[in-house]
Image (cartoon, helix red, strand yellow):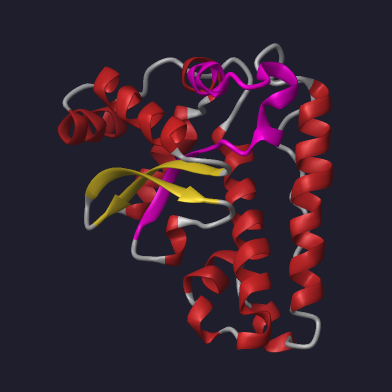
Amino acid sequence: MAYELPPLPYAHDALEPFIDTMTMQIHHGKHHATYVTNLNAALAQYPDFQKHSVDDLIRNIATVPDAIRTAVRNNGGGHANHAMFWQIMAPKAGGDPSGPLADAIKASFGSFEAFKGEFKKAALGRFGSGWGWLVTEGGTLKIVSTANADTPMAGKQTALLTVDVWEHAYYLDYQNRRPDFVQAFLDHLVNWDFVAGNLAKAK
């Protein structure tokens, strides 16, 4: 069964003024769609691997044939990362987390403000294209970044929150001002209920 582009959970203009309509149309309808198309093309001759979820495919990338492993890693990773990214954001979101998620962030980073500082540092410190992440590993929250379409899901970490810092994610609105985009993401776009759900599932 071919992988499919998941629909956005909101309208293309729902995240304005922080992400504009055209960025969402291009990012979801072109960039993410291309990952899905290329992943299906790479797996066309390997139907057994099409049975796996994209997360399982990436998690077990070492079992993928050498001839297509790089294509699956890049396009499968891009598909998985973006599928989460759309869910991470929501209209009229942001603010502070609450409940067990807030407690876990405070236990791991000292405070929510300290967490935001570390998260921004990871997202802004990624040279070139990539992602900033909040993950859990062995019951501990950590902040990491990955390059290009790499994903912490390929290892022993479970992703809870991610921000896309490829330029196509923000350039029409912010040009070279990645710090402004990441700040707007944290202040106005993060769907903390979804992140809390990820943490609950990880436990």
Magenta segment: does it hold 134? no
Q: Is residue 2 left or right of residue 54?
A: right
Q: Nearer the viewer, residue 98 or 42?
A: 42
Image x and y of residue 182, in percent: 51, 24
Observer-nearest of 165 and 186: 165
Q: Is residue 54 above or below residue 203?
A: below
Task: Let me know if residue 1 appears in the view.
Answer: no
For the point 47% across and 21% down, the residue is 186
User: In the rendered view, does 144 fall on the left or right side of 154?
Assistant: left
Q: Residue at x 51, y 26 (%)?
A: 190
Q: For residue 80, what is the image quadrant? A: bottom right
Q: Magenta span has 169?
A: yes
Residue 7, by quadrant, is top right
Instruction: Tell me, yes or no, if residue 58 can be seen here.
Output: yes
Left or right of 112? Residue 164 is right
- The range drawn in magenta is 157-184
- Residue 66 is situated, as x and y percent measured from the top left of the image, at 61, 86
Relative height, residue 54 to residue 105 (above, below):
below
The foreground one among 75 and 52 is 75
Q: Is residue 158 above or below residue 11?
A: below
x, y (%) of residue 97? 36, 23
Quadrant location, the N terminus: bottom right
